[in-house]
Amino acid sequence: MSKTTFGWVLTPNARDAEGALTLHKNNDHYIANLGSVFDTIWVEDHFQWDTIPVVECWTALVYYAAKHPNFQFGPLVFGQSYRNPALVAKMFSTLYWLTEGRMIAGIGAGWKEDEYKSYGWAFPKDSQRIAELEEAVQIIRTMWTQSPASFEGLFYSIQDAFCEPRPDPPPPLLIAGGGEMLTLRVVAKYADWMNVGFCPANIFARKLGALKGHCDEVGRYYEEIKKTYYALISISEEKMEPIQREGLYFIQGTPTDVTTELRDFINLGVEHIMIKFVDFPSTTGLNLFKEEVVPHL
């Protein structure tokens, strides 16, 4: 089994308007403290959380990738509906070229309905959004490997499109989502990396079982897909009141607790773990993780 590596998920939104004044400074301070333990930095792709100030994903990625050349960067993940897929292919290709390979192309079907409606995008049912995702990743792959590129689908099409300079080799394509019938089938067919987050290890194991089944059906070698997990971590020296939030699972407790639970994911084959520490902007949790968890993994 290859060594498990770690990424940090940048905080894209402040808790309130006053927090927005220091959000940028806090993120920079946090990055300065990541050290050599973390290889990647990720940005979520959202536009609004009610009145909370939010930075736009791609703008932030480009800025931080230029400012911090020691890390790889990627969206976790682009909502496929938000941008034309041919444009996305070009955006990914350009940043991959400019950063000399420090970019991972993350994409998913999208889910935040209020955001779609507020910004004027249609929000079709899940099955259609996943079908759109499948066409989008086919266009991205085609744009990266053919010149000119053409594709005719039900939702998207391109004709004699150029994406020069094409990435050679192409960046890793990460597809996020845990839908066991549809999304993980798209992962099995097209992804270099998979990502599921915010669930306990037993649920993640079930997702991997579904992915393996799809791989067998489509003739894909399951082991060639890199397994990644997005973790929300609350870590402290002493036991604290457990965090409970509907729809989200937290890895929480003492360094020993966190180590034990992360080891469960690693034993399932997880090779990269993206982390958001819930005590941001404090670096207390980050430092505990680096000093008392990572050495035992």
Image (cartoon, helix red, strand yellow):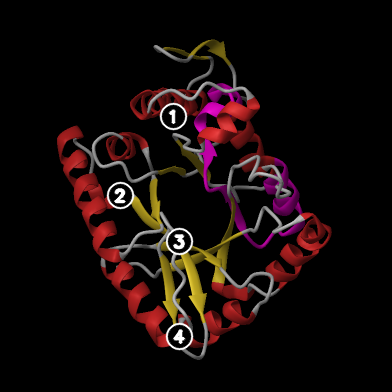
* Left or right of 61 in this view: 123: left
Under mark 2, the amino acid is Glu
Under mark 3, the amino acid is Arg
Residue 74 lies in magenta, yes or no?
yes
Earlier residue among tags 1 and 4? 1
Q: What is the number of the mark on residue 203?
A: none
How would you rate the neighbour count of disc 4 (Cα within 10 Å): few for under 14, some for 14-19, many for 20 or more?
A: many
Q: Nearer the viewer, residue 209 or 89?
A: 209
Residue 15 lies in magenta, yes or no?
no
How would you rate the neighbour count of disc 1 (Cα within 10 Å): few for under 14, some for 14-19, many for 20 or more?
A: many
Q: Position of residue 234 (x, y in %)?
A: 50, 74
| Badge 2 vs badge 3, beta-carbon distance below 8 Å | no
Q: Depth-wise, is mark 3 or mark 4 nearer the camera?
A: 3
Q: Position of residue 34 (x, y in %)?
A: 63, 72
Q: For the residues marked 1 and 2, what is the alpha-carbon distance in whole angstroms? A: 18 Å
Q: What is the number of the mark on residue 137?
A: 1
Under mark 1, the amino acid is Val
Magenta range is 59-87
Would you name the residue on which mark 4 appears? 255
Q: For the residues marked 2 and 3, what is the alpha-carbon distance in whole angstroms? A: 34 Å
Q: Depth-wise, is mark 2 or mark 4 nearer the camera?
A: 4
Would you name the residue on which mark 2 appears? 224
Earlier residue among tags 2 and 4? 2
Would you name the residue on which mark 3 appears? 245
Name the quadrant containing residue 220.
Answer: top left
| Badge 2 vs badge 4, beta-carbon distance below 8 Å | no
Q: Depth-wise, is mark 2 or mark 3 nearer the camera?
A: 3
Under mark 4, the amino acid is Pro
Q: How many numbered marks does the figure carry?
A: 4
SS assignment at label 2: helix
